[in-house]
Image: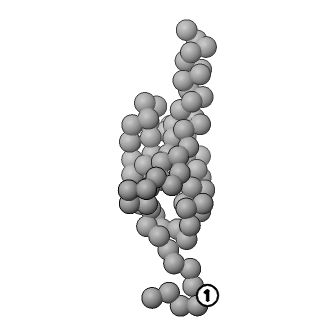
Amino acid sequence: MVLEGETRMHSYRCYVLDGRSRVAAIKPFECASDVEAGQRADALLVQMPTFHGVEVWDRKRRVHINLARAAAARASLAKAQ
């Protein structure tokens, strides 16, 4: 039961992705909203510079994806060839 003025927290799973966009780690956390969960995942990615992306899921629903670093790495490889 959520009392007036309280925020209901949702459980999310953050999948941290390697350079091939494969799951390298799973970080569960709770947030009040999908937007907050996405922001938290992006902050996690900044703290883990060896990884290339994150996906955030609320059960079977993907609520956020950030593959910017993976795309930049692929572009860099393409330039080198």
Q: Quadrant of the N terminus?
A: bottom left
Q: Say which of 73 and 63 sits in front.
A: 63
Q: Is residue 70 left or right of residue 25?
A: right
Q: Residues within 10 Å of mark 1 (few under 14, many from 20)?
A: few
Q: Is residue 13 visible?
A: no
Please say if 74 is above or below 63.
above
Q: How is the image coloured?
A: one colour
Relative to 55, residue 12 above or below? below
At mark 1, the secondary structure is loop
Report the front residue among 7 and 50. 7
Residue 17, given in percent of the width and then of the height, sits at 44, 40
Q: Mark 1 — residue?
A: 5
Tell me the amino acid under the disc marked 1: Gly
Q: Position of residue 22 (x, y in %)?
A: 39, 37
The mark total stands at 1
Name the residue rendered at 47%, 70% in the picture: 10
Tell me the residue at 50%/74% (across/down): 9
Q: Quadrant of residue 38?
A: bottom right
Residue 62 in view in this figure: yes
Of all residues, the one furthest to the top in this rendering is 81
Relative to 76, say whether 12 is above or below: below
User: Which quadrant of the view contains residue 23?
Assistant: top left
- What residue appears at the point 43 percent right and 60 percent down from the top-left corner? 58
Position of residue 50 measured from the top left corner of the image (x, y, whole percent): 50, 37
Residue 70 location (% of width, % of height): 53, 32
Q: Say whether residue 79 is left or right of residue 65.
A: right
Q: Residue at x 55, y 8 (%)?
A: 81
**Outermost residue to the front:** 61
